[in-house]
Image (spheres, rainbow, N blue to C red):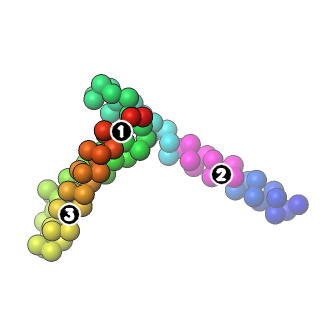
Amino acid sequence: MILNAREEKMNVVMNQVAAAIRRPLSMLTDYYSSVLNKKLSTKQTLSLLNAQCAFIFTVFSGCSLMLRALLLTWLVASLLKCRESLREKC
Protein backbone atom coordinates (compact mmCIF):
# COMPACT_ATOMS: atom_id res chain seq x y z
CA MET A 1 0.00 0.00 0.00
CA ILE A 2 2.78 2.44 0.92
CA LEU A 3 4.81 1.44 -2.12
CA ASN A 4 1.87 2.08 -4.43
CA ALA A 5 1.33 5.52 -2.91
CA ARG A 6 5.02 6.34 -3.38
CA GLU A 7 4.96 5.08 -6.96
CA GLU A 8 1.86 7.14 -7.67
CA LYS A 9 3.43 10.24 -6.16
CA MET A 10 6.62 9.62 -8.16
CA ASN A 11 4.57 9.27 -11.37
CA VAL A 12 2.82 12.57 -10.65
CA VAL A 13 6.14 14.33 -10.08
CA MET A 14 7.69 12.81 -13.23
CA ASN A 15 4.67 13.86 -15.30
CA GLN A 16 4.99 17.41 -13.98
CA VAL A 17 8.71 17.48 -14.82
CA ALA A 18 8.05 16.12 -18.31
CA ALA A 19 5.36 18.75 -18.89
CA ALA A 20 7.71 21.50 -17.68
CA ILE A 21 10.35 20.34 -20.17
CA ARG A 22 7.91 19.92 -23.07
CA ARG A 23 6.37 23.38 -22.69
CA PRO A 24 9.43 25.47 -23.72
CA LEU A 25 10.39 22.85 -26.31
CA SER A 26 6.93 23.14 -27.83
CA MET A 27 7.28 26.92 -27.94
CA LEU A 28 10.68 26.59 -29.63
CA THR A 29 9.20 24.14 -32.15
CA ASP A 30 6.46 26.64 -32.97
CA TYR A 31 9.04 29.40 -33.36
CA TYR A 32 11.26 27.37 -35.70
CA SER A 33 8.19 26.30 -37.66
CA SER A 34 7.17 29.92 -38.20
CA VAL A 35 10.70 30.98 -39.20
CA LEU A 36 11.14 28.10 -41.65
CA ASN A 37 7.52 28.18 -42.89
CA LYS A 38 7.40 24.42 -42.37
CA LYS A 39 5.76 22.33 -39.69
CA LEU A 40 8.54 20.80 -37.56
CA SER A 41 8.50 17.89 -35.16
CA THR A 42 10.13 17.86 -31.74
CA LYS A 43 12.88 15.62 -33.12
CA GLN A 44 13.65 18.16 -35.85
CA THR A 45 13.71 20.97 -33.29
CA LEU A 46 16.16 19.07 -31.12
CA SER A 47 18.32 18.45 -34.18
CA LEU A 48 18.39 22.18 -34.96
CA LEU A 49 19.18 22.98 -31.35
CA ASN A 50 22.05 20.46 -31.37
CA ALA A 51 23.51 22.06 -34.51
CA GLN A 52 23.25 25.52 -32.98
CA CYS A 53 24.99 24.41 -29.79
CA ALA A 54 27.73 22.71 -31.78
CA PHE A 55 28.24 25.88 -33.83
CA ILE A 56 28.43 28.13 -30.75
CA PHE A 57 30.92 25.86 -28.98
CA THR A 58 33.05 25.42 -32.10
CA VAL A 59 33.22 29.09 -33.09
CA PHE A 60 33.50 30.67 -29.67
CA SER A 61 35.86 28.25 -27.97
CA GLY A 62 39.31 29.34 -26.94
CA CYS A 63 40.69 25.87 -26.30
CA SER A 64 43.39 23.53 -27.51
CA LEU A 65 43.67 22.36 -31.09
CA MET A 66 42.65 18.81 -30.13
CA LEU A 67 39.45 20.00 -28.48
CA ARG A 68 38.67 22.26 -31.42
CA ALA A 69 39.02 19.26 -33.74
CA LEU A 70 36.52 17.34 -31.59
CA LEU A 71 34.14 20.29 -31.59
CA LEU A 72 34.44 20.60 -35.36
CA THR A 73 33.64 16.90 -35.69
CA TRP A 74 30.57 17.41 -33.52
CA LEU A 75 29.53 20.39 -35.67
CA VAL A 76 29.85 18.49 -38.96
CA ALA A 77 28.02 15.44 -37.56
CA SER A 78 25.21 17.59 -36.14
CA LEU A 79 24.80 19.50 -39.42
CA LEU A 80 24.56 16.26 -41.39
CA LYS A 81 22.03 14.86 -38.94
CA CYS A 82 20.09 18.13 -39.01
CA ARG A 83 19.95 18.11 -42.81
CA GLU A 84 18.71 14.51 -42.76
CA SER A 85 16.14 15.30 -40.08
CA LEU A 86 14.77 18.33 -41.92
CA ARG A 87 14.24 16.30 -45.09
CA GLU A 88 11.85 14.01 -43.20
CA LYS A 89 8.14 14.70 -43.03
CA CYS A 90 6.63 15.38 -39.62
Q: Residue at x 33, y 44 (%)?
A: 85
**Number of marks in the image?**
3
Q: Earlier in the sequence, mark 3 or mark 1?
A: 3
Task: Residue 57: name its quadrant.
Answer: bottom left
Residue hosting label 1: 88
At which x and y percent is residue 9?
A: 73, 54
Residue hosting label 2: 13
58 shown above or below 25: below
Q: Residue at x 24, y 61 (%)?
A: 74
Quadrant location of the N terminus in the rendered image: bottom right
Residue hosting label 3: 73
6 shown above or below 79: below
Report the amino acid beneath label 1.
Answer: Glu
Q: Residue at x 45, y 36 (%)?
A: 26
Q: In whole angstroms, how far apart are the C-alphas of marks 3 and 2?
A: 38 Å
Q: Secondary structure at mark 1?
A: loop
At which x and y percent is residue 48?
A: 30, 44
Report the amino acid beneath label 2.
Answer: Val
At which x and y percent is residue 31?
A: 35, 31
Task: Residue 43: name its quadrant.
Answer: top left
Residue segment shown in magenta: 11-20
Quadrant location of the C terminus in the rendered image: top left
Q: Is residue 54 left or right of residue 62?
A: right
Q: Residue at x 18, y 71 (%)?
A: 67
Q: Earlier in the sequence, mark 3 or mark 2?
A: 2
68 shown above or below 44: below
Res. 56 in view: no
